[in-house]
């Protein structure tokens, strides 16, 4: 089955067109996993490439991600429980004291577009809440975001709480946000640092490739 | 924007300029022209060689000057509609040395620098016309303008302007351009070359300039006769006095052109400058130079003449902080003033003595910012975005809105050189400065650039003009 037309609609961020193409593929009897991998995720790879070349802007990239999500929603009922393959699970949230979530939401959208399963804990997430989610969900990655320099210490507090609870080694920690730097990430013992939504995807892929 | 000059101020300068023409007059070093001027009603004193030009005479000549005309590009992509209110920025010429970034010093300019700067202007979208950028020290004087214009036309389709040293140079240039155009009539109809000449401030016109202008206007080539007085040296030290004298010179220049050939497209010429009187160093990047130029726009437009103005000059010796702020201030002022044709705005350093390839690329970006600013703020139901604001509501975001994608390309200017990226990402890329980025743009353009005359045309030109040389 050829998914070129579907991919094109995703790359263009044409939501109506993409949903129609997805339905068409399902009606033609294509395997949902193939539609996901070869149609949707492959298109998002092209989008990521165009973005890093500077020929596509962030709003276009996110429009594509949003379009993809609409298609995934259509595919979901087709998968039997547990048969859909995910690139990995990521827990995300803005840290305690920080209510600024636009950046986190955009990163989540991009990661979802790249094939990850996202568990979004929302805003103002206390260290204990992060610890509980890690224990319950067993994600590969925990992502934390902060916009305010005053809430950055909450990142360190969360990492300490994970250590105390004995979960630090079970998960890789990725952080980001306007005031966050790679230097800060090193200082507090985070594993990965992503300055923007695009690099969040490549960092997350890097974590899984490293095993 | 608050203007420097009120209507009453402009009137006073204009009156003073006209008074200068009536009482002091213009010294013209061409006896035939003086005789013709006398016959036409000017007062000519053989003793001092001056022509005193009364108000009636000036007005009679200027009546035939077009208030709107086009300087054409060869491919129609960058025609300059002068007098339309549009502002066009271009480079400047007659520099004699070029910054060599490898050594950090200057070297004399060569014919290849004419070719390369024409290629840069062709590719840099905000630089709208090309002025022969520099002297070519490897060219023999006898076929000088044949070659500098040929290599300019070979590398850019944009409008090409140049100065000519003498009548023979003017002939070479026009013959070449007529050959490229397919004759005088098509060139006259769509002139893609033009020439600037200059009187000698204060208030003097040399004989060769008269001959050059007579020849060019007889062939329908658009011109400007642009005084370049320097406050405190070749003009009074007050800005008002410099403006009054320049205005007299510029009006006389435009009127003389119309006297020679009524209807010739002519720009009111103005290249006022200042000096740093502490040392008598030229100060073309001074704020006063920018102010003088801005005021000249009002004077030219009072006569409904498009202006040949200047901006973007700097006294800095390299593409540095001083170059940036001096160029930024004057480009912005001249753009806001509505100057029609702004030359010297790209590629120049060192008080106009030197050029730099990298500076062309940097100036293209500065001009791009000014052009964006001149487009202004578009107000309508779509741009006010009420519907979009209602849809997103409190706490949402606009990044993923269709409205954003629809407007983001036209609403914002996207610089290629300015460093905007997040610090870590910038460091990760090797912390490139705007100058380093400009260097790679220069390399890209010069590597990929192709000729703008097809090989058959070039072959024909070379056989008909055997004195054309290679770079």
Image (spheres, helix red, strand yellow):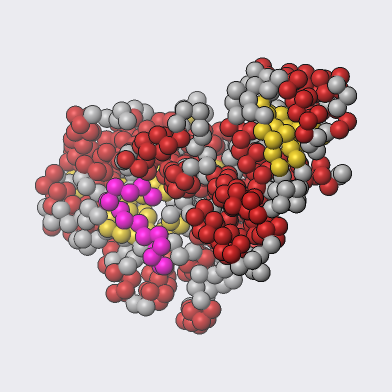
Frontmost residue, B463 versus B186: B186
Q: Quadrant of the C terminus of chain B?
A: bottom right
Residue at (59% x, 52% y) in the render:
A74
**Predominant secondary structure in magenta?**
loop
- Residue A32 seen: yes
Residue at (22% x, 53% y) in the render:
B67
Q: Is residue B236 above or below residue B150?
A: above
Frontmost residue, A165 versus B255: A165
Residue A188: x %, y % from top left? 81, 23
- Residue B112 seen: no
Residue at (22% x, 56% y) in the render:
B66
Residue at (86% x, 44% y) in the render:
A210
Was residue B78 drawn as part of the magenta stretch in this picture?
Answer: yes
Q: Is residue A70 left or right of residue B436?
A: left
In this figure, what is the number of numbered marks? Answer: 0
Q: Start and end of the magenta stretch?
A: B73-88
Was residue B185 drawn as part of the magenta stretch in this picture?
Answer: no
Residue A124: x %, y % from top left? 65, 21
* Quarter of the view holding residue B291: top left
Frontmost residue, B462 versus A24: A24
Q: Is residue A153 above or below residue B70?
A: above
Q: Is residue B287 left or right of residue A73?
A: left
Q: Is residue B77 above or below residue A49?
A: below
What is the residue that sits farthest to the front in this orientation? Answer: A80
Q: Quadrant of the N terminus of chain B?
A: top left
Residue B243: x %, y % from top left? 30, 35
Q: Is residue B238 left or right of residue A38?
A: left
Residue A34: x %, y % from top left? 70, 61
């Amino acid at each position: 089955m050829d998914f070129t037309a579907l991919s094109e609609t995703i790359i263009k961020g044409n939501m109506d067109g993409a949903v129609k193409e997805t339905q068409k593929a399902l009606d033609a009897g294509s395997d949902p996993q193939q539609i996901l991998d070869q149609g949707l995720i492959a298109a998002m790879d092209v989008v990521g490439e165009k973005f890093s070349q500077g020929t596509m802007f962030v709003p276009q990239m996110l429009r594509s991600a949003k379009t993809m999500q609409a298609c995934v929603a259509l595919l979901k009922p087709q998968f039997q429980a547990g048969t859909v393959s995910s690139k990995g699970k990521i827990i995300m949230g803005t840290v305690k004291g920080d209510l600024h979530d636009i950046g986190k939401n955009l990163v989540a959208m991009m990661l979802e577009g790249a094939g990850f399963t996202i568990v979004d804990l929302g805003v103002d997430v206390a260290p204990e809440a992060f610890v509980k989610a890690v224990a319950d969900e067993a994600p590969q990655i925990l992502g934390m975001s902060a916009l305010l320099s005053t809430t950055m210490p909450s990142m360190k507090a969360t990492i300490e709480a994970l250590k105390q609870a004995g979960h630090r080694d079970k998960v890789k920690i990725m952080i980001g946000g306007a005031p966050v730097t790679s230097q800060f990430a090193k200082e507090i013992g985070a594993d990965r640092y992503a300055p923007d939504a695009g690099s969040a995807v490549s960092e997350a892929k890097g974590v899984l490739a490293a095993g | 924007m608050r203007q420097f000059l009120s209507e009453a101020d402009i009137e006073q300068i204009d009156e003073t300029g006209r008074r200068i023409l009536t009482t002091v007059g213009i010294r013209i070093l061409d006896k035939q022209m003086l005789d013709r001027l006398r016959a036409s009603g000017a007062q000519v004193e053989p003793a001092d060689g001056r022509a005193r030009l009364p108000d009636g005479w000036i007005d009679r000549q200027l009546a035939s000057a077009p208030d709107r005309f086009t300087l054409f590009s060869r491919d129609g992509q960058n025609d300059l509609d002068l007098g339309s209110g549009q502002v066009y920025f271009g480079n400047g010429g007659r520099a004699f040395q070029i910054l060599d970034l490898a050594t950090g010093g200057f070297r004399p300019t060569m014919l290849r620098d004419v070719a390369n700067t024409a290629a840069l202007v062709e590719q840099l979208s905000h630089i709208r016309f090309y002025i022969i950028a520099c002297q070519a020290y490897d060219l023999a004087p006898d076929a000088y303008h044949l070659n500098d214009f040929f290599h300019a036309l070979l590398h850019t389709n944009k409008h090409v302007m140049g100065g000519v040293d003498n009548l023979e140079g003017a002939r070479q240039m026009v013959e070449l351009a007529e050959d490229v155009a397919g004759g005088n009539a098509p060139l006259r109809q769509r002139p893609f070359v033009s020439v600037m000449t200059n009187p000698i401030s204060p208030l003097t016109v040399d004989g060769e300039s008269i001959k050059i202008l007579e020849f060019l206007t007889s062939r329908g080539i658009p011109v400007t006769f642009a005084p370049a007085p320097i406050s405190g040296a070749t003009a009074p030290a007050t800005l008002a006095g410099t403006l009054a004298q320049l205005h007299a010179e510029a009006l006389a220049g435009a009127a003389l052109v119309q006297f020679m050939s009524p209807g010739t497209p002519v720009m009111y010429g103005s290249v006022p400058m200042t000096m740093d009187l502490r040392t008598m160093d030229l100060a073309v990047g001074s704020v006063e130079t920018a102010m003088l130029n801005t005021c000249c726009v009002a004077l030219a437009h009072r006569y409904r003449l498009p202006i040949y103005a200047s901006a973007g000059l700097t006294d800095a010796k390299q593409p540095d902080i001083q170059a940036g702020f001096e160029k930024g201030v004057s480009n912005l002022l001249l753009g806001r003033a509505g100057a029609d044709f702004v030359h010297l705005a790209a590629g120049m350093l060192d008080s106009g003595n030197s050029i730099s390839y990298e500076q062309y690329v940097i100036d293209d970006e500065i001009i791009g910012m000014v052009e964006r600013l001149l487009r202004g703020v578009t107000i309508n139901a779509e741009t006010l975005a009420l519907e979009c604001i209602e849809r997103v509501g409190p706490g949402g975001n606009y990044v993923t809105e269709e409205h954003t994608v629809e407007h983001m390309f036209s609403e914002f200017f996207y610089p290629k050189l300015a460093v905007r990226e997040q610090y870590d990402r910038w460091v990760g890329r090797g912390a490139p400065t705007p100058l380093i980025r400009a260097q790679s743009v220069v390399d890209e353009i010069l590597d990929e650039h192709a000729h703008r005359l097809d090989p058959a045309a070039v072959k024909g030109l070379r056989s008909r003009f055997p004195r054309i040389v290679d770079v």
